[in-house]
Image: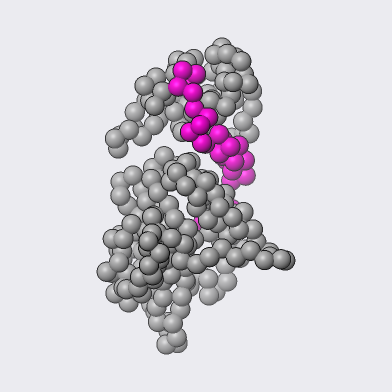
Amino acid sequence: MDVHEVSAEDVELEYVSAAGVRQRGSLGRLWPVRFESVRPERRFPAFRGQGNWCGWYWSATCGGHVGYESWLERDHLMLLDFDPLVTGMASQPFRLSWTGPDGKRARHTPDFFVRRADGTGLVVDVRPDDRIGPDDAEKFAVTAAACRSVGWDFSRAGSPDGVLMANVRWLAGYRHPRVHRPEVAARLVEVFADGGGLLAGALRVGDQIAVLPVLFHLLWRRVLTVDLEVELLSADTRVRLGLVREGGKDALASSAVASG
């Protein structure tokens, strides 16, 4: 298939609904399905001697578990979960198939489907640069063209920045809502209104053992923010008010937001 001539009607899509019913049809007909809510199209294998690590990641965005088939996929799940513009995601959401140049059927199951706050869709394949062979490159190209034909974006994600990923992994440990304490959160927003050092600001609020988890939770939610790509989080990291998404608009964090 010439990627410049890919039509949504030429690509077949197969998925398993939230009710467990397998569905099949053209991409052109099925693209409106809420794929962020479907079941994985295939199971995540586990066996002795397995070269990759499969598992389930609890997503704060989804309020439930999302599967992954490698540590790299898990890392990208964390990054998606950390993205304030993402409202839903599903792993192995569907299988695409099409007729190749040789007349044989080619098949590909993307790693993730992502729904954004503006309603748009994003299809993600996770694969390091050095692990993309000619067949993989062709499948990614056709998948990207098929996505464009229905208004979705496509991303082939490789290895993320090491410093950013280390910081997001740390903050992910505090992503669960049970970490949140409204009264402490409101005080932290007041303390960091003009910016300041991470540990010094936490100590102004109270016992660091009680305050730091709430601070990291607010950093995860982007109510407070730091530069995560420059250096690893430390006592001296400068913390400031972040931008949080409210009703589709960016607004400065407030005590009301922090308390919610």
Asked which quadrant contains residue 73, the reply is bottom right
Task: Indicate the quadrant containing the C terminus: top left, top right, bottom left or bottom right.
Answer: top left
**Residue at left 42%, top 57%?**
113
Residue found at x 46% / y 66%: 41
Chief secondary structure of the magenta portion: helix
Q: Quadrant of residue 229?
A: top right
Residue at 57% across, 67% down: 132
Closer to us: 240 or 21: 21
Quadrant of image for the N terminus: bottom left
Identity of the residue drawn at 61% across and 15% down? 207
- Residue 144 visible (yes or no): no
Verify whether residue 175 appears in magenta: yes
Whether 101 is drawn above or below 27: the answer is: below
How many circles with numbers are drawn on the protein?
0
**In terms of image quadrants, where is residue 152?**
bottom left
Q: Position of residue 125 (x, y in %)?
A: 49, 60
Q: In the depicted view, which residue is nearer to us: 211 or 138?
A: 211
What are the residue bounds of the magenta stretch? 156-185
How far across and down, in percent of the image, does residue 257 sit?
Answer: 38, 25
- Colouring of the image: one colour
Considering every residue shown, the one lying at the far bottom of the view is 103
In the rendered structure, does residue 120 fall within the stretch colored magenta?
A: no
Residue furthest to the front: 19
Q: Position of residue 238 (x, y in %)?
A: 56, 23
> Vertically, is 115 above or below 148?
above
Q: Position of residue 175 (x, y in %)?
A: 52, 36
Asked whether residue 95 appears in the rendered view, the answer is yes
